Amino acid sequence: MSQFAKSDVCHSQTAIDKAHFSLAAGARNFRSRIEFGDALLLFYFVVFARPWFWGFENAAAWCFTIPLAIAGWYLYVATKQPEVGRFNLSFWLIVGLPLIFIYALRAPFPDSSFDVWTYHLFHGERGLVGFIYRPGEFFPTPAPYNPAPDMLTAIFRHLLGYRMGTIINFLALLWAATIVDKILRPYVRRPRLRAAFVLLTLFAEHLLFEINNYMPDLLALPLMLEATRLVLDSNEWRANRRVLVRLAFLIGASMTLKLSNGAVAIPIVLICIWRWLSTRPLNVKSLAFDALLSVVVFAALLPPCMWWVFKLTVSSVMTFDKGYFRSPLYPATNGWDGRWGGFGAPEILSWPILIFFKPQRTAELGVYSGRLSIGFIAALMLLALGRRVEARTRKLAFIVVLGSLLWSLTMGYIRYGLYIEALSGLFMIVIASLLLRESARITLRWQSVLAAIICLILMVQAVFAYSYASRQEWSMRPTAFQEFSSFANESKYLFRDRSIGRWLPAREREMFDRVDVWVVSGSKTAGLLPFLNDQAPVLGLRSAGIISMEPSRREFARMLDTYAGKRIYSLAFPEDYEESVKVLRSVGIGAGPVETVVVPFFGPSPLLTLYIFEIQRNPVAQ
């Protein structure tokens, strides 16, 4: 071989070695950025990407969805700051074990929450294969809410079964715990003590009430907390010039999962704008590009669902809010539920404090230990001190105060304020740590006493939270301590409960298969339909006052006419049957002879007793 040929071979080998080294270094660099929550975040990207392909055939849609989701997830992780200070075993034991204990108390008992049966299950199953309402259907559920959170829980339901599918909420809460730990690091240096404080922060009753059911409110909590961490962290802001874009994604994703998060995110946005404008030197061109990119990233998350809702209702984001987004198919309302929150300006402004004294107006469960109230008062007092407090803590207090007021203004319903609830507990820990730091510096004992009182309050609230969570939750299931034999029996079906059809007796299966069209006249039945007969189109009469609107009544009658000659059936629980008959009569149709069916709910037990009856187009007057 010639000298030149040998030289070419050497150069080629050197180039290959450099490429291999570069790939290996890139892989190591990527791995250094991956954290606990990032594995979970990949599933979030999947449900954000899937609506863009709702108009495609299902198999083809997933062929586009999965690569797009992986690409978006990779870009998010690769542009993060490398993780500093990994979590050790003590953190997972101190934080994880108590939370998994609370989760396990009811895990084998399948969730039967009202909202879950009314629409969450329906939206989750339908959203994975297309838009939640199919052509030829009439509002099967109360409103076409964005199904992204229900799709997320549905993925875990398909992977792990109905009972264990709720583990997504436990994992989201554990992910939130890792972010709370990061926010507390500048204030609490000792890792084990900080882990105990993280547990106290998240051990609040309304967080624990949702740890093992299919309610979606916890899913956005880690995203909102991560946005808070980014906007508070000056080092992150200086080191990562794309932090603005990351914040836009986190807030947009939080709103996609729960639109009400847009209100409590406003303080984060305001601080973000202030940081952006105060950047020195001010590079207008770079900031303008980042702002434009942030708008694009934010806007990429909501439009797919908004477009399908607009096609359906000639409306926009929340179809039932005619006061804001007009639709001829819904009654005039701004979405306010008068059962919750303050009445009138004085109560609304003071609701973050009043909520402690009026727990019956916090939510349907009607208990509250006052976490948000104490955090709100402490944040107000700290803001009054002005510049005597460090900037990071002032910003945190600003988020707590303004976020609480905006939450109160939008409704004051505690399920929509879980982010502020968690942030209030975190803020109390921050105050206690600052008091102890001050006490150590100037040897004043009252600061130590006050810090101890704050920690004692948090511990008492944690005791109350466990007491409440051990007695009730959204599905009102018993715990292992209350019905151990049932707990042990239901545990047999863990990971084996992916469908209802597998357990249906032959009579019931044949009965459901003969249905050509469903009419939803009973509450709590729409969520069962995708598991009983998902081929039959669904016409709904239980949507937020929809049958009071003449255009809606005409549209329902028109669609019903298109199914003339078809076998049209409805389901109702026995206790809801009379109300179902009234609903049917209000639109000029009636119920035929009733048959009783028994539906095994994702296993041989529990057994649901239902009435099934054929719809009569011209009912005999009774």
Image: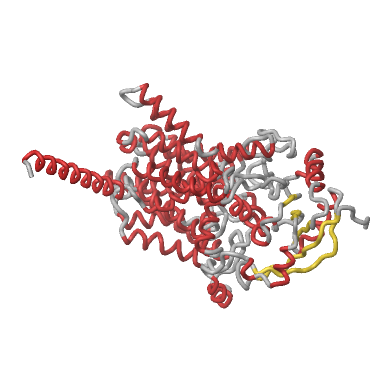
Q: Is residue 532 above or below residue 555?
A: below
Outermost residue to the front: 1
Work out whether residue 334 or residue 361 is closer to the camera in this orientation and state it. 334
Work out whether residue 49 or residue 202 is closer to the camera in this orientation and state it. 49
Outermost residue to the right: 621
Residue depicted at x 42% and y 42%: 72
Q: Quick one: quadrant of the N terminus?
A: top left
Q: What is the x, y in percent for residue 404?
A: 53, 41
Q: What is the x, y in percent for residue 130?
A: 60, 47
**Colour scheme:** secondary structure
Q: Is residue 431 left or right of residue 17?
A: right
Residue 608 visible in the current orientation: yes
Q: What is the x, y in percent for residue 29?
A: 27, 46
> On the image, which quarter does residue 576 sit in?
bottom right
Residue depicted at x 55% and y 51%: 151
> On the image, which quarter does residue 320 sit in?
top right
Q: What is the x, y in percent for residue 429?
A: 40, 49
Residue depicted at x 30% and y 45%: 82
Q: Is residue 295 above or below residue 199?
A: above
Residue depicted at x 65% and y 36%: 310
Outermost residue to the left: 3
